[in-house]
Amino acid sequence: MQFHHHGYVSGDPRVQPAAGVGIDRPAELPDEVDVLIVGTGPAGMLAAAQLSQFPGVTTRIVERRAGRLAIGQADGIQARSVETFQAFGFAERIIAEAYRITEMAFWKPDPADPSRIIRTARAVDDPAGVSEFPHLIVNQARVLDYFAEFMANSPTRMSPDYGLEFRSLSVADEGEYPVTVTLLHTSGPHEGHERIVRAKYVIGADGARSKVRESIGCTLAGDQANHAWGVMDALAVTDFPDIRTKCAIQSGTGGSILLIPREGGHLFRMYVDLGEVDPHDKGAVRSTTIEEIIHKANEILHPYTLDVRNIAWHSVYEVGHRLTDRFDDVLPEQRGTRTPRVFITGDACHTHSAKAGQGMNVSMQDGFNLAWKLGHVLEGRSPQSLLSTYSAERQVVAKNLIDFDKEWSTLMAKKPEEFEDPSELEDFYVRTAEFPAGFMTEYSPSILVAAPEHQHLATGFTIGKRFKSAPVVRVGDTNPMHLGHHATADGRWRIYVFADPATPQTPQAGTASPTEQFAEWIANSPESPLAATPEGADPDAWFDVKVIYQQDHTSIDINAVPAVFKPKVGPFQLTDYEKVYATDPASDIFDLRGLDRGGVVVVVRPDQYVANVLPLTATAELAAFFTPLLPDRKPEKLPSAALPAGLTAHSAKTHSATTPSALVNN
C-alpha cells in the first residue's frame, strides 16, 4: 500500500480523497448519469466498485430493496475471486472471517448395511496449487459490504441508491444520453412515484428475472432438469462427524446432500435432494416445508441425526441451465454497425445450479470485465469499439460454466447404484478442480488478446488466462512478496518487463542491455503506449510498468535501474521505488513461470488477464497491439478523470504538504 506521496496522511490510508464527481456528490440520483447500474448483487457491486475509481465518470447503482442485503443466497468464494478481492484491498480481511475449504469428504452407503452411510474418501481441495489464495465460504452479504466500503472510500464517494426499482428503458439513435430509464420509488417519501433517468450506458445486474434483459429483447434459453433440492442455512446439534467439512453424501435409501460449512464455526448449509419432479408439477415442489427438508436430511444421514435448532434461511429450487444468446443490446444483424449501450451481467444472462458454487464468482468476473472497459471509453482512453468485446468474451465463459454444472449436478443427483465406477464423483471433483477454482477462463484472440505467437517465451503466463502471481523480492525495501498482489483495481494496464541476464549498470555508450533499450523506447518513443498518457498526469497514470531482474536483490543497484521503472509521481515528484523487483532465491519466478532468460514482456489487462507476451525487441508489435486501444493523439491537457485523486491540473503544481493522500500509485 502506498500513500504520503501527495503529503502526510494521519488517517485511514484506504480512504481516498474525494475527486471529480465525488466532490459534493449529490445525495439524490441525478437526472443524467454516465453509467446506471441496476441491482446491487455481486456483478453490479463489483462493476460499481471498479467504476468508482474513475473520478470523471458519473456512476450510480440503484436497488429496489430499501437497504443492504442482510442474508445472501450465495456463499462459495473461489480462489480466483479472492485474487480479485486482493485487487480491491480486502482479501486478507475476508479470509480472516470466512470458512476455508481444504478438503472434501465423500460419504456413501455402507456395503455391509446400505441403510447406513460411511466415509469412503477424502479429496484435497487444491491438489495442484493453482493459487496462493484459498477456497472460502462466506455470506454473499459480506462480500457486498466490502465492495460498498471500497466504493464509499473511493474518489467518487459512491453508494447505492436504495428503494428504486427498474421498470423499463428505451435507447435512442442519437444524443449524449441515449438511454432513457424509468424507475419506481419503492420506499421513502416518493414511494409509488416514477422517476426518469437518462444514461450513456446501463448495466443490468438485476438477477434471473431481469427486467433489463427483457427490455432489450433477450430471453434465457435452456433446459429444466426436473430435479428439486431443498437448501437451508442451519444451526444444529448433530453426531455427524464431518459437520465442519465440506461433504458430498449419497445415501442407500435414495437422495444426496451437499454439505457446506459456513463462516463462524457453527452455521452450515445443506443442499438436500428432494428427488425427481413431475414435469406437470407446476411448481408445487416449491411449497415443500422446512420440516420436510429436515426430515429428508435425517433420512439421508442415517445412522447420524440432525437436531436443527435454528434456520437462518431456506428455499426450494429446481435445477435449470439457461443462457442468453447475447449479453448486450446489439442484435446479431447490427454487429459492426453500432456499439452497445445496455449490458446484462450475472444471473440476468446465465443461470445454473448453486451446487458448483459458481454463480456469484462468474457474475463478479462479468462485472470486472465490463466495468474497466466502460471506464476507459468514458474517460477517452479507448474507442467505443472496446465495449463489443464484453459479450463476445463473457458468453463463452458462461457456456463453459453451464456445461460443467450440468455434469456436476447430474453426478450429485445420481443414486449410488447408478455409478459405473464407485469413485466417479470424487474423481470428477479432483480432475476438474481448476474449473471451479475459476482458472479455466481463457479469452480468445481479439482486439484485447494477442495471438500466441510468442507464448513459448512465457509458458506459465498463458495469453488469455488470468495472470498467475509468483513470489519476488522488491529491491527497494528487500521485502518478499507476490508480484500480482501489487496490482490494484485502478483501471491501469500492467506491463511486466522480465529482464535479460544483464544487471542494470550506469549507462555507458554502446553498452545498453536489451532491457535498457526497451526501457528507453517505452519511456521516450512517440510509438510507445506511454506516449498516450495525458499531459500533466503522473507517467504511470495509465500504464503500470514494472521490471523483474533475474538476480537476487543484493545484486541490483537501484540507482542504475532505468528511470521508467522509477517514475516521479505526485505533486512533489517523489520517486516510486516499488516497481523494481528481483527473483526470490527460494522460488525463481523465471523458472516457476517458464520465462525466457533472454527477457520477455508480459502485458496484463486491468482485469488481470494476460493480453500479450513479447520479446524485449518487439517494440513495434507492442505499439501495434495498443494502437486500436488508445486515443488517436496525445491529449493536450489532462482530463479531470485522469488526475491523481483529489487533484486538479493546477493544484498538482501547488499542492500543500498537508493535503491528505490517496492510494493511486501501486
Image: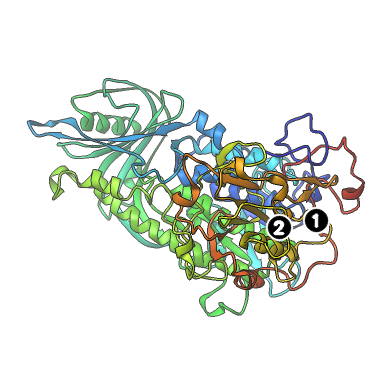
Alpha carbon distance from label 2 to label 1: 9 Å
What residue is at 67 percent from the left and 62 percent from the top? Answer: 511
**Element on which disc 1 rests:** loop
In the depicted view, which residue is nearer to us: 438 or 225?
438
Residue 475: image x %, image y %? 64, 42
Instruction: Please give left or right for residue 261 compared with residue 23 in the image.
Output: left
Q: Image quadrant for the N terminus?
A: top right
What residue is at 61 percent from the left and 66 percent from the top? Answer: 387
Q: Amino acid at mark 1?
A: Ala
Residue 396: image x %, image y %? 44, 64
Q: Amino acid at mark 2?
A: Trp
**Element on which disc 2 rests:** loop
Tell me the residue that label 1 is attached to. Answer: 537
In the depicted view, which residue is nearer to us: 520 or 463?
520
Q: Quadrant of residue 23?
A: top right
| As drawn, 374 above or below 271 | below
Give me the disc on residue 542: 2
